[in-house]
Image (cartoon, helix red, strand yellow):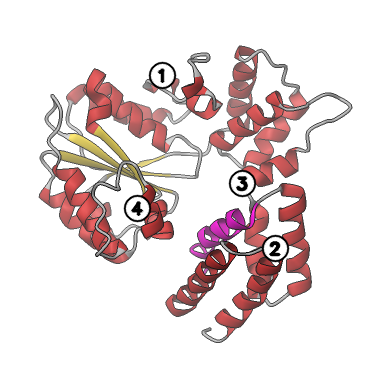
Amino acid sequence: MRGANGNLDFFWVERYRPRSFEEILGQPVVKVQLQHVVDTKNLPNLLFFGPPGTGKSSAAEVVARELFGDVWEGNFTELNASDIFEQGRKYLEASRSLARFYDERKGVLDNFKLIMNRLAGIAPLAAPYRILFINEAESLTRDAQQALRRIIERYNRTCKFILATARPSQIIIPIRSRCLPLHFTQLPADTMLDFLRRIATEEGHALSDECGRSIVGLSEGSLRTALTLLQIVAEGDSSEAHPPDLSVLAEHVHPKGVSELLQLALQNDAPKARHVLDRLLLETGLSGGEIIAQMRIQARLLSLNEKALAELLVVLGDAEYALLDALNERIQLEALIYDIASAVSTTS
């Protein structure tokens, strides 16, 4: 692990990102398999699956570093499927890396096909192939996955694909059958705690056992969340007179209350939903936009039929648009609670 390296490493999640297989925490089986891939220089398409924060993105980057050396950045492209298919045109237009491929005359799906073909068709730099890494691949629609399958086949010799997902069942069988599956397991609590202690020491901060175990428990197995919480606690006011409220911090980093809010709105339980909304706004400090963005993510995890999910996403989109000119976020979010119950009840 390394210490600070200028402003680019301000966030500890990036500063202590693994640069080699030895630095990846846990995952002994995965590391052996990936080391074999690097040693033989024979990279198949890969499917990384497992809980969030277990090292899937870091492992993809390490594979590129090990295979391509100094030119790894020129041969490695990372995309987040949820950004493309949940934010749509807004994200594509604003993205520095994708805006050059974006065609405003086309829809999101057609732009996705265009972007993937362009990226996969870029000639590798001093290497036999390049790597295209797609994170949160479960957010790809079925049509997008069918298109991706054809792209994987077309560019198989010069572009290798790594897909990462927390829900492999959402990936269509034709793609899964073309990838080597690698399972990332949740890290043991003691392993995470030892890592946090080491980082705290390197950064010149003391980490009590009580605080460390609280961070590990609240992170729910995500090392990324745990490291973010550790930095917030370490760099904030952690004196005995003002102890950090870890539960509030954890919810801001990983807002579980948003899922509760959405469930209560769907159940048409407005009083309880308003109570949760107050907590998210006043105690956790989330903005209206952040709440709606998280609700959109949670919506896709619900067991709703396609029509109900579509109606729910439309309601969330309308609410996000209304927030742009709103003078009072809370009024708009309260209206959203009732709109959700009404929209889904009429389509269920």
Mark 3 or 1 closer to N-term? 1
Mark 2 or 4 closer to N-term? 4
Q: Is residue 48 left or right of residue 9?
A: left
How many residues crowd mark 3 within 10 Å: few (<14), some (14–19), many (20+)?
Answer: some
Q: How far is the residue under mark 3 from the one under mark 4? A: 25 Å
Q: Residue furthest bottom?
A: 346
Q: How far is the residue under mark 1 from the one under mark 4? A: 35 Å
- Counting from the top left corner in percent of width and height, residue 28 is at 42, 28
Q: Of tags 1 and 4, which is closer to the observer?
A: 4
In the picture shown, does residue 208 fall above or below 286? above
Q: Amino acid at mark 3?
A: His
Mark 1 or 4 closer to N-term? 1
Q: How far is the residue under mark 3 from the one under mark 2? A: 25 Å
Q: Residue 254's mark?
A: 3
Q: Residue 92's mark?
A: 4
Is 256 or 310 nearer to us in this picture? 310
Which residue is the site of mark 1? 22
How many residues crowd mark 4 within 10 Å: few (<14), some (14–19), many (20+)?
Answer: many
Q: Amino acid at mark 4?
A: Leu
Q: How far is the residue under mark 1 from the one under mark 2? A: 50 Å
Residue displayed at 30% across by 60% down: 172
Residue displayed at 11% across by 50% down: 154
Q: Secondary structure at mark 4?
A: helix
Q: How far is the residue under mark 2 from the one under mark 4? A: 29 Å
- Counting from the top left corner in percent of width and height, residue 87 is at 43, 57
Q: Of tags 2 and 4, which is closer to the observer?
A: 2
In magenta, the rendered stretch is 287-303
